[in-house]
Image (tube, grey):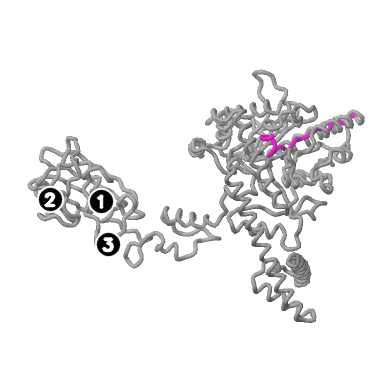
Amino acid sequence: MRGRGLWSPALPRRTLPDEELGISGTPASAPPSTATGRKMDNGRQATHTIVRGKEHCTVRVGTASTMMAAATERGRSGIKKKGNGWGRARRRGSVGGPARARIGEYLEYRFDGKAAAASQILAGNFLLADFFSFAETMVLAHTHHDPDTEVGGELHSMFATRYVRSSLPKYKLPLKEIPKDAAYQIISDELMLDGNPRLNLASFVTTWMEPECDQLILKSLAKNYIDMDEYPITTELQDRCVNMLARLYNAPVGDGECGVGASCVGSSEAIMLAGLAFKRKWQNKRKAEGKPYDKPNIVTGSNVQVCWEKFARYFEVELKEVHLTENYYVMDPHKAVEMVDENTICVAAILGSTYNGEFEDVKTLNDLLDKKNKETGWNVGIHVDAASGGFIAPFLYPDLEWDFRLPLVRSINVSGHKYGLVYAGIGWVVWRSKDDLPEELIFHINYLGADQASFTLNFSKGASQIIAQYYQFIRLGFEGYRCIMQNCKDNADALKNGIVKTGLFNILSKDQGVPVVAFSLKDTSNFNEYDLSAQLRSTGWIVPAYTMAPDCKHVTLLRVVVREDFSRTMCERLLWDLQHCLDVLESQATKTAKIVAKALSESAGTKETLNEIVADAVEADVSPLKMPHIFDTVLRAQKAVRLWKQKSAHRSNNAVC
């Protein structure tokens, strides 16, 4: 309200005000109001009516005679010669305009027909619009009585309302509503306990987009993509994205031809759709040949994402997994082809393993499988799960053959919400040609206004992420994506080099792959990867610790996913925090060793004594000793003792030298 030439009561200078105000000068949580007004009539009187809920207030400005005459008709004057209630009007500067309140006129407030106060205009020559704007503020201040924000009949701030003092419903829908600002504040406060998405280095999902794209998303939140007849342009944008992806992956489409594909809520749905297409084509072929078609299987590596296991279980397909081997943490194409039989609907290759970001050798797989198809007369194809690598390989490794350049690659899925640089909720599936998508899987509906082809597992879905994907495609183009992916790779390399310099880790990720740094501790006698992950969490970083895929579960590793918003400065900070956490854990291990060594030196090592040692260590808050079983705890403590003795001897030798 500053600078608008408004009347305003003098703000307190020596004592606290009697009531709180909102940021606009109105009481906090003030409910909305509506107002109507009219200009000065010939009798020098203007009125302004304000409605808030069931309460009505009329504000009048005019000469004493017109105001008294109006009051006489109502049977009540309400005019006071001296300014009170809200004080005298003061001039804030000259404002032009035809409708003005003049010196000597009066301002009157009436609530539900009852006079509350009136003030004579002693200075100024203000616009009526400014009068009424000020009047509305004062009316709200006078009439505002919100029991939800009052305790004992007095107004309280948000953090003194009853909602902060009582637990909100968790299992049952509440009977009554609460103010919108209270709901917002309480939920917002609770969400503060979530991790920071920008510091969540476990996730491949995009956590930042440009503000202009954020605006497009907000504007399209109400659009349901499935309403294609109502939102034809959104449908057109999806088709454009499919066309761009088909050509990016070298699908055999000519000029002016459309690619074959669909948008999904993520790669999981995309994989389900691609798997169903393979299964149906295989079943149709087996039926035509008069052969059994009730035992389909699919060949994958044991490092596949869980959505492949879901597909196999939900759609009754046997999952044949190629086991991993030491130091080779992706599917071996030779072993995969050996597992293929006449019931195999396809072989799934991963372009960017979830565990370490490594690309599988799709080219070798294609060549070996093509040879086997020719020998057996089968027609087993390949699906490439490029959820992460589909937006990496075309830009960083353009000569790598993994896509539709290989004749047996029939379909590809990719996550737009990963390195496609869109917020969570968008994935894509693209087929080589129409022949690879059975027509009987496509549904045609017309109850939304026009004939629409649909091949999705769900029906309704938001259109905003599709629009955001198209924004990124035209905003960045090929060179823009290439630059961003190169930045990610460079930052991943810098992080990897910094981790190697510590001398404490083995690097499990590869140079060619998704910009991921996977690493494990060389020595876990003092602390392990889970301890380090927990310690990093205390600094704000979310770095997951997990075991490798089946057959290599003895390998525990940490993983950092380098995304677009992970800058070189953040990389340097992470390395600093990593070293700090290592120092903290090392000091804890030393403290543990001293406690245990001292206790062992003073005892005969009985079971009871060992239990006491563990209890003392736990009481000293030595985290590595907090294990579920006392036997494991003692073994770990004994290892710590041996390490401590070795370090003590080493220090003694150095001192002698």
Residues under labels 3 and 2: Cα distance? 24 Å
Q: Position of residue 498 (x, y in %)?
A: 67, 48
Report the Cα–Cα distance between label 2 and label 1: 22 Å
Q: Position of residue 222 (x, y in %)?
A: 50, 39
Label at residue 40: none
Specify the segment rendered in magenta: 377-392
Q: Where residue 391 sits in the image (x, y, percent)?
A: 66, 34
Q: Which mark is residue 120?
A: 2
Q: Earlier in the sequence, mark 2 or mark 1?
A: 1
Q: Secondary structure at mark 1?
A: strand
Does the magenta run of residues contain 379?
yes
Q: Nearer the viewer, mark 3 or mark 1?
A: 3
Disc number at residue 18?
Answer: 3
Residue 202 in view (yes/no): yes
Q: CA distance from mark 3 to mark 1?
A: 24 Å
Q: Establish if 528 lies above or below 424.
A: below
- 433 left or right of 17 in image: right
Callout 3: SS:
loop
Task: Write down the residue under mark 1.
Answer: 56
